[in-house]
Amino acid sequence: MVISVSGDAPAEVLRLLADPARAAIVDALAAGPACTCHLVEDLGLSQPNVSNHLRALRHAGVVKAEPYGRYTYYHLNADALDAAAAHFSELAARARATSDNRREC
């Protein structure tokens, strides 16, 4: 899997969450930390598939990994999600404020 980072964190988060499997992983991790085996069982995805998606999410800063004994637990980085949500809220506010500003052709 090739991971591209655009340099625009909110756009990267949106791109990552557009994938249904990654969105399901993020949704599952919202309930609390989990290891790969939990996510495989809960989501019905293969272990390599879950690991690849977790790697992409970690690379973008959406998920953090925490070693715990023989296992690694993954949890959401709430700050990254808050930053992306704030960016999109700001875009929505700008769109509302400028919705009547039609440019002439």
Image (tube, rainbow, N blue to C red):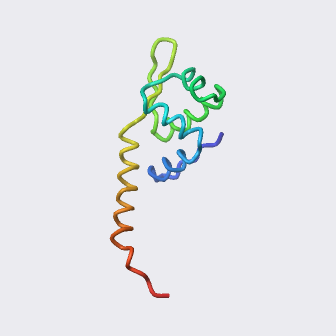
Q: Residue 58 location in percent, x, y?
A: 50, 35
Name the spot of residue 8 as percent of width and height, x first.
46, 53
- Location of the N terminus by quadrant is top right
Left or right of residue 91: residue 23? right
81 relative position to 46: left or right: left
Give the answer, above or below, for where 17 lies relative to 37: below
93 and 3: which is toward the camera: 93
| Residue found at x 49% / y 31% | 28
Front-most of residues 38 and 13? 38
Determine the residue positioned at 48% across, 23% down.
Answer: 34
Instruction: List the single residue furthest toward the top.
Output: 69
Q: Provide residue 102's location: percent of width, then percent of height.
A: 42, 81
Residue 78, percent from left and from top: 37, 38
Q: Nearer the viewer, residue 32 or 83?
A: 32
Q: Residue furthest bottom?
A: 105
The residue lying toward the viewer, choosing from 33 and 80, is 33
